[in-house]
Image: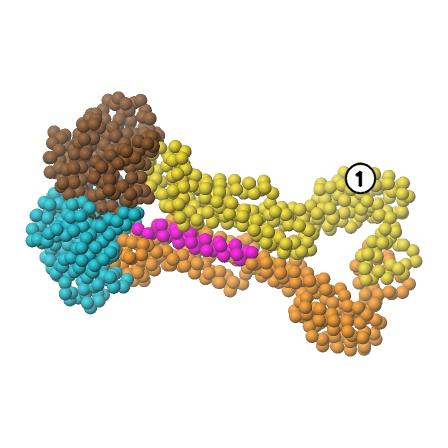
Chain colours: A cyan, B brown, C yellow, D orange
Amino acid sequence: MTPAAIIEPPAMMELHRVWKVYSVGPVKVPALSDVSFQVTKGEFVTLHGPSGAGKTTLLRLLYREEIPSEGEIQVLGLDLARARRGEVAALRRSIGVVFQDARLLPGRTVYENVAFVLRVLGTPRREITARVFEALRAVGLSARAQAYPAQLSQGEAQRAALARAIARKPLLLIADEPTGNLDEGMAAEVLDVIRDVWAGGTTVLVATHQKALARTLRRRTLTLQNGRLLKDEG
Amino acid sequence: MTPAAIIEPPAMMELHRVWKVYSVGPVKVPALSDVSFQVTKGEFVTLHGPSGAGKTTLLRLLYREEIPSEGEIQVLGLDLARARRGEVAALRRSIGVVFQDARLLPGRTVYENVAFVLRVLGTPRREITARVFEALRAVGLSARAQAYPAQLSQGEAQRAALARAIARKPLLLIADEPTGNLDEGMAAEVLDVIRDVWAGGTTVLVATHQKALARTLRRRTLTLQNGRLLKDEG
Amino acid sequence: MLAFLVGEALRDLRRAGRVAASAILLITLALGALGGFWLLSTNLGRAVGEWRERVKLVVYLRREPSSADAAALVERVRGLPGVASVRFVGKAEALGTLREVLGKDAAVADQLLQNPLPASLEVVPTAGGATPAGAQALIAGLAAMPETEEVGGGVEWIERFARGQRLVTLFGLGLGGVLGVAAILTVTTATTLVLHARRDEMEIMRLVGAPEHIVRLPLLLQGMTQGLLGALLAVWILFSVHLLLAPRLEPLVAESLGLARLTFLTPLNLATLVVIGTLLGGLGGLLARGRATP
Amino acid sequence: MLAFLVGEALRDLRRAGRVAASAILLITLALGALGGFWLLSTNLGRAVGEWRERVKLVVYLRREPSSADAAALVERVRGLPGVASVRFVGKAEALGTLREVLGKDAAVADQLLQNPLPASLEVVPTAGGATPAGAQALIAGLAAMPETEEVGGGVEWIERFARGQRLVTLFGLGLGGVLGVAAILTVTTATTLVLHARRDEMEIMRLVGAPEHIVRLPLLLQGMTQGLLGALLAVWILFSVHLLLAPRLEPLVAESLGLARLTFLTPLNLATLVVIGTLLGGLGGLLARGRATP
Ligand SMILES: Nc1ncnc2c1ncn2[C@@H]1O[C@H](COP(=O)(O)OP(=O)(O)OP(=O)(O)O)[C@@H](O)[C@H]1O
Ligand SMILES: Nc1ncnc2c1ncn2[C@@H]1O[C@H](COP(=O)(O)OP(=O)(O)OP(=O)(O)O)[C@@H](O)[C@H]1O
Ligand SMILES: [Mg+2]
Ligand SMILES: [Mg+2]
């Protein structure tokens, strides 16, 4: 399934002098300026920064929803600048992403949304139901399995996106504000789920604007501000 | 512009034994169960509750995006069960809503999104530019005026929605998690903006799942859980 | 407020891009077909008019009347119902005509000892007299005159004429049916396209309290603009095709239908096409609605 | 995996609802028009074939040959290039024909002292001999024979025939052009519709790493299903229309084109229509793409 290069990566990800400049009409918006860092396999990294700091932009570069204006990015040993379409798809299947805006398939129920990625991975049919419900139970959504995305509250949608990301047991889990729409109790539960996934060997990268959350996690924290990497500590 | 009944309302809003039950296939989801309360003109009310408690559902009923399964709702003196389409539109023009998912017009820039509601209200053209920039400055977005919604970070989109809601100086401001995607510093600024609007005479209803926020505001707080109104205190 | 509405309609049209172009072309196609049929039917109608003038009944007379008697007879026949015009043909004229008709074989006529052809009246019936039933009555009336030896000559023309009209009608019905389907499809598709492009936007507009006319009118104006553009395009295409093909088709048409010229649509026809297009487009815009307020 | 893909295609089709129905009907319309033209052109082709048999040249002979000489002459003419068949018409037969042609005026023929009509050969040209150029050569050859008095009779038929063929070709080109536009529009519109309905979904699928064939193939299958349904509908409509109209049109057609029967399309023609429809639909599905990976 995954190309040989992905099996034993030198580093989970590696960014070298990455810039991302958006053009809005004549205006240039530098969303990321000269960002370099490395994450090794099995790390748990928190990406912290205020609104508009460039957190989502950085994560998007990692699964190649965007390409950098300058600089080099390697994820799971794959050089994203040179990757072919099939390789990008294979890479994305190894990464579980919790999008900030959930991005569930609008025409499918919660169950079908989670089952879809498993089918795409070629998971045998008889395993799928069990694994989908296991993931939904973990995020506390098994009761809403038959609901369509438009029928979910914001917090529920985000948890469904988390279930979709973890059901496939990814090598890398990227979560963009996974607790942004959750109350404290629910947020703690969701963090426990993410910690369990990490304990199972998955590398984790969580973006958040909540200082408190970053502190709670007590992990390596990258701090972004105005597109610059201010601190790398923990 | 606004019907006579709206000018001197007996109460800003009044809910009487309101139920909202959604059907998801054969399953009935009771999002709100037997909710009754009143808000008078000039109040600042916080609606608190965990994810899925029914906060968004309750707010939707107030500007009639949804209709209750049972019970009666009056807003600004208008009985929503009996309101005609033109009356509903007039009511919505008197209410500023910050949607949880921002809901900006996707084909228009931030400036145009804010200007649109002013034009709809019949604001003279020469006033519009000044008022739009005043609102954008208040939420710290004047630099992003020419960006389209897809070019905003989540936090920026939510602030644009707030600018749109306050630019028209509404009688009632409804804000659904206005700080959900904001860091602490930005959240405090946004709350100051909302307090200023309230100080100008607007009645305010803010929904949040953040206990800390509800406590900071030290205002009347309605607490929802599983669709039931648990507490009404402050 | 009007400037605002028109501005909204234009920006929508610009943004709709390929979708709008597609809707415009669909309307062009439907109107082009309609106009083409109209063109056809106008010219067929003219052909039918000319055919009618060729329909004539021949009343063979028992003997050649004096010229005064002939004039009186012509007067009398002209008074019968269903008669448009009457012409007297003397024996000598009849032989002359036969000689022309024979052409190569005219030698036959030269060999005659005496003129065996009878004098006759050529009767052109009115539109009413040219229907199968009207012709029946007219023939009966003509046959009943004491001067008449026999009536003949035109009946098969009348039937051919009636068949020709049936053919045109059938053709029109068939094409009309197909066009009806095309027009309905055009409107439905345009509506669906516009709807898809605007549903979110319309819903948000309603939620911020935009009055219904501000939500809908731009769509209506946009639809009407599309319809107008489509119609103008169709008129232009029809005109070009007519300009290009008419000179080439005329010899063939002259032979098969007996028309010397293929006329184009009148300005009134063209204006009607443009109005229909605008209304069709407007209907598409009008039908499009976002999620209704509950 | 196949079951998954087919399942995806069917669920998309179901969800597309009105949009899919619209696309299907557009394909039906385009194929119906194509099939209708085909039907027309098949029958016109048959009519042209029958016209050709009516084209004949008449060689008027200086004097009536003996029956042995006549047979030899016929043999010789048959050997000329461009000649399909030859028939000898004696003086007596010619007068009999004239009498039939005169009908009402046959009295003229009875008054003759002697038969003034010449004997003749009726020459039917081959397809090559029936072109304007071929006829020119054939007429020259026939005129050069010592027995020939004059050649005539068929030239205007040949020109009429050539014009008829030109008319059919022009008609075909015109209709073909309109159909081309309709087909392209159909595909574009179907593509746009499908795209609008699926753009978000396809983008999300790509983001979760679905391989390109899983993103695209259901769309292709869905498009092909739409095309297939549209084509079958078109065939059914053509069949019904033919069944309904053919008996009514046949008398008119017999008169104007000389065809006794209007034939339907062959099974091969129908299969081709169905294949074209399926390919058109598939093309629409194939062209639709979400936002490309950067
Ligand atoms: N597609 C785009 N086009 C133009 N500018 C963009 C685009 N996407 C993001 N930006 C800008 O880049 C900056 C960083 O955006 P980003 O979404 O990465 O922020 P963020 O840290 O995720 O913020 P938040 O916490 O609010 O989600 C913002 O100023 C934003 O307006
Ligand atoms: N359209 C709908 N159809 C079916 N169920 C719905 C619909 N909208 C909301 N619900 C359900 O109603 C309940 C309340 O939803 P609501 O959006 O009001 O929650 P909330 O308090 O706003 O949550 P959050 O803080 O996560 O936004 C949830 O369980 C949700 O799944
Ligand atoms: Mg973000
Ligand atoms: Mg909510």
- Check disc 1: other Cα within 10 Å, few if <14, some if 14-19, many if 20+: some
Mark 1 lies on residue: C78
Q: Nearer the viewer, residue B53 or C236?
A: C236
Q: Quadrant of residue D123?
A: bottom right
Q: Position of residue B41 (x, y in %)?
A: 21, 25
Q: Residue at x 27, y 64 (%)?
A: A84
Q: Residue at x 28, y 29 (%)?
A: B94
Query: Which amino acid is tagged 1?
Result: Arg
Q: Position of residue A154 (x, y in %)?
A: 21, 43
Magenta span main SS: helix
Q: Nearer the viewer, residue C131 or D200?
A: D200
Q: Is residue C34 left or right of residue D152?
A: left
Q: Is residue D238 left or right of residue B187?
A: right
Q: Position of residue B116 (x, y in %)?
A: 32, 36
Q: Is residue D268 left or right of residue C80?
A: left
Q: Residue at x 65, y 46 (%)?
A: C45
Report the chain holding disc 1. C
Residue lying furthest front: A26
Give the secondary structure at mark 1: helix
Q: How many marks?
A: 1
Q: Magenta residues? A: D174-200
Does C215 appear above or below C190?
above
Q: Is residue C1 visible?
A: yes
Residue lying furthest right: C113
Q: Is residue D198 magenta?
A: yes
Q: Is residue A8 magenta?
A: no
Quarter that holds the N terminus of chain B: top left
Q: Residue at x 17, y 31 (%)?
A: B195
Q: Position of residue D226 (x, y in %)?
A: 41, 55
